[in-house]
Amino acid sequence: MQGKQIIRSLGFKLKVKRCQWICGLLILSLVIPACGDSKIYEWHDTQGSEHYSDQFNVNAKVLDIKPGYEFYSVKKIYDGDTVQLEDGRKVRLLGINTPEIQHRGKQAEAGGQEAKAWLINKLRNQRVRLELDAEKTDKYGRTLAYLFTENNELINLSLVKQGLATLSIYPLNLRYVNDLMTAQKQAEQNKLGIWALADYAVIPFSQLTETEHCGWMRLSGKVLDIRKTSRFIYLIFSDQSDARIDSKWLSLFPDIKSYLGKTLEVRGWPNRREAHFSVLIRHPSAIKIVLR
């Protein structure tokens, strides 16, 4: 059934009493997303009666009907990318990562307190709504979501724009990936937030040591070889270092062979096994070609 037919079937072309059309608008808020660009018009006749229709009238105005989002107060902010809602749900912001704050024996990372303070200030006296993506929860049971304020500000994106968060894309959670990538590129170019901190300067793989703190890092090296296993594609920088790409996400990347001989900057968390370092790459946003 076409959008206009659906709206007509709901009786929006009839005169309605105020209590009736309030109920009707609630129903309409559910119908509009399925009807594409359909508009509902409101006008008053010479007797002052209210009319509603999907047909334009010269005296009409377009009703501003917002979808039926549910908003929540934020009960607690753990750090720059994790909050707890009033209903008890713990929410991890999708697509981003902010530096760690000191907790449970973990060392604080540069920029972590700044990200948390920004989020506390931003969400003070605010309510938020959630948008989910392909994955609904993580292995810790946290809800994975994009967080919006009542002013429709996407908090995940704002953190990246401020340079307070970096991208951490987990396919297939890709709803806002292009916006996030653009925001990070601009923040990096303008040296905002962590992009101005010496703690996150690029380090050659060759300078990593066995005692290196392996938080989020920017590492560089020349791809000397490319190797494949049943699960991973390995970009080999040396006998002691590589970046590995999960084969199931290979379609998101350019031709892997195009990386051979290039100097790359890879962004992520290096895993260390004895003297060998490896960075897991889930999305091409974590790779930057430095020299061709």
Image: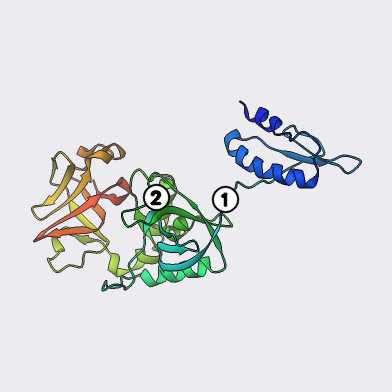
**Residue 103, horizontal then vertical, whole percent:** 31, 73
Which amino acid, by three-letter code, is at mark 1?
A: Tyr
**Tag 2 residue:** 181
Where residue 3 sits in the image (x, y, percent)?
63, 30
Give the labeled residue for mark 1. 69
Q: State the separation of the CA atoms marked 1 and 2.
A: 27 Å
Tag 1 secondary structure: loop
Q: Crowding at label 2, few (<14), some or many (≥20) Cα neighbours within 10 Å? A: many
Residue 125 visible? The answer is: yes
The secondary element bearing badge 2 is classed as helix
Mark 1 Cα-neighbour bin, 10 Å: few <14, some 14–19, many ≥20: few
Residue plotted at (15% across, 38% down): 230
In the image, what residue occupies the spot 25% across and 64% down?
A: 215
Q: Position of 150 compared to 161: left or right?
A: right
Q: Is residue 47 above or below residue 139?
A: above
Would residue 151 be found to the left or right of residue 198 on screen?
Answer: right
Foreground residue among 119 and 290: 119
Whether 235 is drawn above or below 91: the answer is above
Q: Quadrant of residue 156?
A: bottom left
Q: Nearer the viewer, residue 108 or 132?
A: 132
Furthest residue in direction right, as rendered: 47
Nearest the eye: 248 or 256: 248
Quadrant location of the C terminus in the rendered image = top left
The image shows residue 274 at horizontal and vertical percentages of 8, 61
Quadrant for residue 90, please give it: bottom left
x, y percent for residue 138: 34, 53
Disc nearest the viewer among 1 and 2: 1
Q: Earlier in the sequence, mark 1 or mark 2?
A: 1
- Colour scheme of this structure image? rainbow
Above or below — where is 1 with respect to 41? Answer: above
**Residue ID at (86%, 42%):** 49
